[in-house]
Amino acid sequence: MKTDWRERRHRWDLRYAPYAYVAPYFLLFGVFGLFPLLYTAWVSLQDRNLLDGDAATFVGIDNYVALLTADPYFWNAMGNTLSLWLLTTVPQILFALGIAQLLNRRLRGRTFFRMGVLLPNITSVAAVAIIFAQLFGRDFGLINWALELFGAGRIDWQAGTASSHTAIAAMVVWRWTGYHALIFLASMQAIPTSVYEAARLDGATAWQQFWRITVPMLRPQIIFSTVIATAGNMRLLAEPLLFNPGAGAETGGSDRQFQTAALYLYEYGFKKFDFGYASAIAWLLVIATVAITGLSYLAARRIRTD
C-alpha cells in the first residue's frame, strides 16, 4: 500500500510540480499585469474624471475616435516617440556590441571595467536626467562650452526638435548601453574558440571575424536586446519630463517638441485628470509598442549568418 502511494505521489510530482513552480509568476502577473490592463481597457471606454470616478459615463469608442481623428497633439507625441526610438535603439545596440568586444579581450582590470559599464544602469533615472539637463544647458552647459572651444556657437538644446531629441537620446543611450553590453559579453564568452581559430587559419582578419562570426552568433541576444530597448523607449517618460523641469514640464517643451506618448498620457491622466482619455492613450500605446516590437524582432532576425 505504501509503495502504491509513493508511486502515485511520484507521478503527481512529475505531472503537476512544474505547474506549481510557475504558478506564482502567473498569479502575480494576473494581479499586477493582466487585471490593470483589462481595467484600463474598460476605463478607456468611459468619460471619467480621476477625482470623481463615481460620475463616470460610458462613451464607447469615442475616446479612441477623438485620439485618432481630432487630436494632433497625440500624433505629435507618437512622432516624437518614434524619432527617439530610432535615435536610441540603434546606437544602443551598436555601442553595446563594440564595448562587449573590447571587454572580451584580455585587458588588465577586466572585472573592474565590466562592473563599471553597469553603473549607469543602476543610477537613478531622475539623477541622470537632471545631470544631463545641466550638461545640455543653453547658457552654462558643459556641451555648449565644449562646442565653443571648437568655434561652434551655443545651441538651445531644449528649443528645437532635433536638438532636444539628441539630448534625450544621449541620456537613454548612456544609461542602457552597458546593460546590453554585458548581455552580449556573456554570449561572446560562450562562442567556441575553435571557430575563431579556424577563421584565423583561413586568413580572416579581426574585423571579419567580428562581423562574420561574432555578430551572427549573437543574433538571439541582439533580438532580445532590440525588443527590450524598443519596449523601453516606447514608454519613455522620466527623461523628457525632467529634461525641462518646472511648470508645464509635461508638455515636453514650449511647442511640445519632445513630448512623448507616455508624457502625453501623463499630462491627460495626472494634470487634466481625464482618466478615460488617458486610458485610451495607454491602450493605443500598448498596440503601437507591440507592433513596433514585432517589426524590430523581424528586422533583427534578418541578420545574415553567412
Image (tube, rainbow, N blue to C red):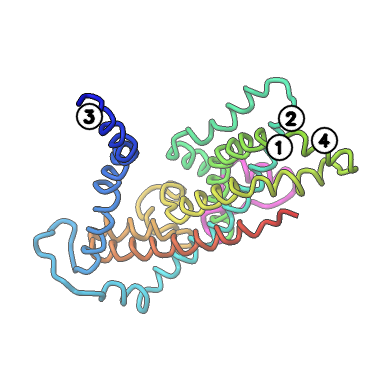
Work out whether residue 127 can be spotted: yes
State which region is magenta.
Answer: 136-161
Disc with the residue nearer the chain's start (3 vs 4): 3
- The amino acid pointed to by label 2 is Arg
Disc with the residue nearer the chain's start (1 vs 4): 1
The CA span between labels 1 and 3 is 56 Å
Q: Residue 170 appears at what percent x and percent y? A: 58, 47
Which mark lies nearer to you, 4 or 2?
A: 4
User: Could you tell whether 55 is left or right of 16 in the image?
Assistant: left
The CA span between labels 3 and 4 is 57 Å
The residue at 59%/32% (across/down) is 117
The residue at 54%/63% (across/down) is 295
Disc with the residue nearer the chain's start (4 vs 2): 2
Q: Residue 126 appears at what percent x and percent y? A: 42, 39
Residue 101, numbered circle: 1
- The amino acid pointed to by label 1 is Gln
Which mark lies nearer to you, 3 or 4?
A: 3
- Category of crowding for the residue at label 2, using alpha-carbon neighbours closer than 10 angstroms: few (below 14), some (14–19), many (at least 20): few
Residue 105, numbered circle: 2
Disc with the residue nearer the chain's start (3 vs 2): 3
Image marks 1 and 3: residues in contact by CB distance under 8 Å: no
